Image (cartoon, rainbow, N blue to C red):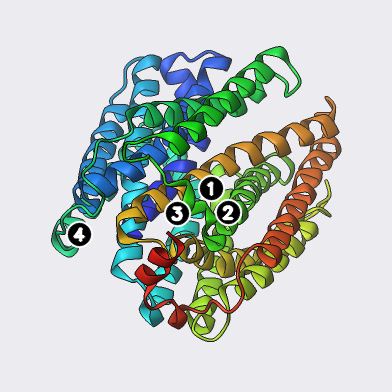
Amino acid sequence: MAVVQFMVSVDLSVVNLGLPQIAVGLGFTGAGLTWVIHAYALTFGGLLLLGGKIADRYGHKRILLLGLILFGLASLAGGFSQEAGHLVAARALQGIGAAALSPAALALLAVTFPSGKERVRAYGIWSAMNAAGGALGVLIGGVLTEYASWRWVMFVSVPMAAIALALAWRGVADAPPLAPSGRPDVLGGILATAGMSLLVFGVVRTDQYAWTSTTTLLTLAGAVILLAAFVWVERTTTRDPLIRLGLLANRSVSGANAYNLLLGGAMAASFYFASLYLQRILGYSPTVAGLELLPFALGVGVGAVFTIKLGNRVERRTLLIVGGLMTAIGFAWFGFISADGSYLTDILGPSIVTSLGFGLCLGPVVSAATVGVAPHETGAASGLLASSRQIGASLGLAALGTAAAERTAGRLTPVGLTDGYALGMTLGAALLIGAVVIAFIVLPRGATEPLQQGTRDLVTEAD
């Protein structure tokens, strides 16, 4: 599961630094090039809920293996692309594969480690690999783009998928599907997928259409209507629902997903603005910029180790509050970057504080989102969590990117650009303060891992 999560995290960031070469190599237009990113985000974010339900119904291991095969083949096809449309289609297939394997992997983690010290350790390892993949993806993308070819930012996922496939085939136990065998809620699946896809589509296109433009407003309104229809169908259907709405009555599940939404937005912004600052303002090459972001990944690993050490004695709620506050402090420090700054003072210092905070947050938020959930709903709960992270990343990056661009206001000088990046980071701190408030108000008290024995009894009682 750690290899799977590392691969998915790498793929979210590895392509970015190769975009200029991709544009030249395949003849992309300026607007068309954005679809190398959007095609993946759209299918990944739009299909996560459906992917989680399918994993519950047909078996977590089976769907994980199928998702890995599709992801690996799509990566291979993308590397051999000869036209712009071929690469966009390959990225869309990668997103479909990721939407299947990501919730299946998280569900396997939740089922395999239901409670106790092993659960804390498993989620600590998972969170460290999640952050390491995001940070190393930037470095890997920079090195491959600079010294090999843009095609290798696609090919690099193939061996990772093969390794994950071999490990999952041998290391994950076979188990029968845990979901009910009733008639599936096809209409709910269509509405949820269409609504989530339209929401992601509207958000990621804010780089072309302003938030207040008619195009964006109509797209987001359509997404809201579809998702509202999905909720109505889930409340009234006689079939097996895509996601049982009673699941959200679990305060731990609902609170963790709200927290995760804001955390995802802040995380996406941190890599985005830090990478731009290092390259555009401080003048580092993509490879050097990637290397200078490595302490971020190491800091998350250290934070994850602290989570493992403290998880059996400290409440998840407390870890999320402390981690959120620490991360917010790091973002606020980032907000003081200057055009004549340096790596040591403007990036390394706040990176250490921010990454330690992230490391404290990531494992507990995943654990909180799946605790008290029946085994046959772990895929749906995992899909919901992955969806909140993806939507949060899309919304957060689009909103903070727009705010940064407005602060820059066409001043493409080092001072103007830095002012925009600093504002984006400061707003990221505000998102994290919001996450801390959610953890304080919504998440239940007294939830350390050893207390989570008998989660099936909790679900039965809630039902």
What residue type is disc 1 on?
Arg
What residue type is disc 4 on?
Leu
Which comes sooner in the sequence, label 2 or label 1?
2
Mark nearer the viewer, 3 or 2: 2
Is residue 334 something one can see in this rendering?
Answer: yes
Residue contact at pointers 4 and 1, CB within 8 angstroms: no
Q: Is residue 329 left or right of residue 7?
A: right
Mark 2, other Cα within 10 Å: few <14 / some 14–19 / many ≥20:
many
In the picture, residue 315 is in which quadrant?
bottom right
Q: Gap between marks 3 and 2, in whole Å?
A: 18 Å
At 30% from the left edge and 55% from the top edge, which residue is drawn?
Answer: 376
**Residue that mark 3 sits on:** 133
**Residue that mark 1 sits on:** 389
At 73% from the left edge and 21% from the top edge, which residue is drawn?
Answer: 210
**Residue that mark 4 sits on:** 167
On residue 260, the disc is 2
Q: Picture coordinates of residue 190 (x, y %)?
A: 39, 26
Q: Gap between marks 3 and 4, in whole Å?
A: 18 Å
Which comes sooner in the sequence, label 3 or label 2?
3
Instruction: Give the total number of marks visible in the rendering.
Output: 4
Q: Picture coordinates of residue 423 (x, y %)?
A: 81, 44
Mark nearer the viewer, 2 or 4: 2
Residue contact at pointers 2 and 1, CB within 8 angstroms: yes
Mark 4, other Cα within 10 Å: few <14 / some 14–19 / many ≥20:
some
Comparing 361 with 111, the one in front is 111
Comparing 90 with 178, the one in front is 178
Which comes sooner in the sequence, label 3 or label 4?
3
Residue 88 to residue 385: above or below: above
Which comes sooner in the sequence, label 4 or label 1?
4
Residue contact at pointers 3 and 1, CB within 8 angstroms: no
Residue contact at pointers 3 and 2, CB within 8 angstroms: no
In the picture, residue 443 is in which quadrant?
bottom right
